[in-house]
């Protein structure tokens, strides 16, 4: 869907919108087909250089201009994209994971809208799902957990009080915790209190990338494990009772494939 200001409808019909594209978790093959096609036809790619591996740029043309946003502030970045778009170039803003999650894209959209420049969004695979694939787990097991919480600890970016990690952990649902590994001591204290010190926990460092590392631990030993491995960034923490269930101890099964569960044409997706 193309988003444009009310006065820019005629412009949007003749110009390619600025594309916000999810790069996926790091493996260049995990970008969506639509995202790959956008990169292949781009004239300018502004990518999150501190987060998006340059391997993703293999999908661009040799004459494509590639610009890391790591050293740019918001106005510089938007001005660069706007100037390129106004000169008739196809612009792709490449974000790590899925741009809707901790992507800071809304403020970029607002700036583009002020300039009456249309934009559209291509979703991507977020790190939590790459981590689940690496761990070989399902986040939503019947009668164990049917809720997945994606969250982070408050740091330089504050978190609403009602969404504090301690408040969310009290639900004891499956949680994937982003951008918080530098505060692992606080995380360990909170998760131990909610899930118990023996509660299963996992850390996935650089999910889907060549140097990916998986650490299985417990809530109580989380900090010790992370510090021992000297992990200080680019890691996702997963916690929840689904991690306690192995292939050998699985008891409860989905109704979807239960041969005793009657439904027309076996179309029971909304009964999962």
Image (cartoon, rainbow, N blue to C red):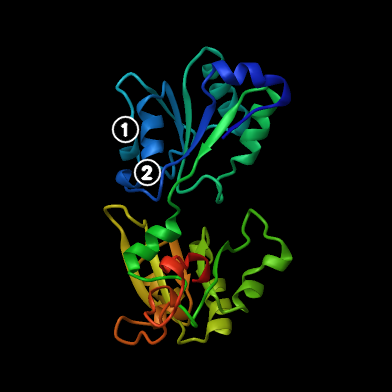
Task: Note whether residue 125 is visible.
Answer: yes
Report whether 244 appears left or right of 184: left
Residue at the limit of the structure toward the left, as seen here: 210
The quarter of the picture where residue 259 lies is bottom left
Which label was assigned to residue 59? 1
- Asked if disc 1 and disc 2 are in contact, CB closer than 8 Å, the reply is yes
Residue drawn 62% across and 70% down? 165
Q: Position of residue 109 (x, y in %)?
A: 63, 34
Residue picked out by circle 2: 31
Is residue 132 depicted above or below 123 in this figure? Answer: below
Secondary structure, mark 1, is helix
Q: Nearer the viewer, residue 185 or 117?
A: 117
Is residue 204 depicted above or below 23 in this figure? Answer: below
What's the distance in space between the residues labelled 1 and 2, CA to CA?
Answer: 10 Å
Query: Few, some or many C-alpha atoms within 10 Å of disc 2 (few <14, some 14-19, many ≥20)?
Result: many
Q: Nearer the viewer, residue 156 or 194?
A: 194
The quarter of the picture where residue 76 lies is top right
């Amino acid at each position: 869907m193309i988003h444009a200001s009310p006065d820019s409808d005629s412009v949007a019909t003749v110009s390619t919108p600025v594309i916000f594209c999810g790069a996926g978790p790091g493996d260049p093959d995990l970008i969506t087909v639509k995202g790959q096609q956008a990169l292949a036809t781009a004239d300018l790619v502004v990518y999150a250089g501190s987060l998006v591996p340059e391997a993703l740029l293999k999908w661009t043309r040799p004459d494509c201009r590639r610009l890391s946003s790591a050293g740019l502030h918001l106005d510089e970045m938007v001005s660069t994209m706007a100037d390129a778009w106004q000169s008739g170039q196809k612009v792709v803003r490449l974000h790590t994971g899925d741009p809707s999650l901790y992507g800071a894209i809304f403020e970029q959209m607002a700036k583009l809208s002020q300039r009456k420049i249309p934009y559209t969004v291509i979703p991507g695979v977020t790190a939590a799902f790459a981590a689940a694939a690496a761990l070989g787990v399902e986040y939503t097991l019947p009668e164990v957990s049917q809720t997945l919480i994606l969250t982070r600890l408050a740091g330089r970016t504050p978190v609403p009080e009602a969404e504090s990690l301690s408040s969310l952990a009290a639900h004891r649902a499956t949680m994937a915790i982003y951008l918080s590994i530098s505060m692992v001591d606080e995380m360990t204290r909170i998760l131990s209190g909610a899930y118990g010190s023996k509660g299963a926990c996992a850390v996935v460092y650089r999910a889907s990338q060549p140097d990916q590392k998986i650490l299985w631990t417990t809530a109580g030993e989380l900090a010790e494990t992370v510090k021992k491995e000297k992990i200080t960034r680019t890691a996702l923490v997963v916690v929840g009772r689904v991690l306690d269930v192995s292939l050998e101890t699985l008891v409860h099964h989905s109704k979807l494939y239960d041969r005793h569960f009657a439904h027309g044409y076996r179309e029971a997706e909304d009964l999962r």
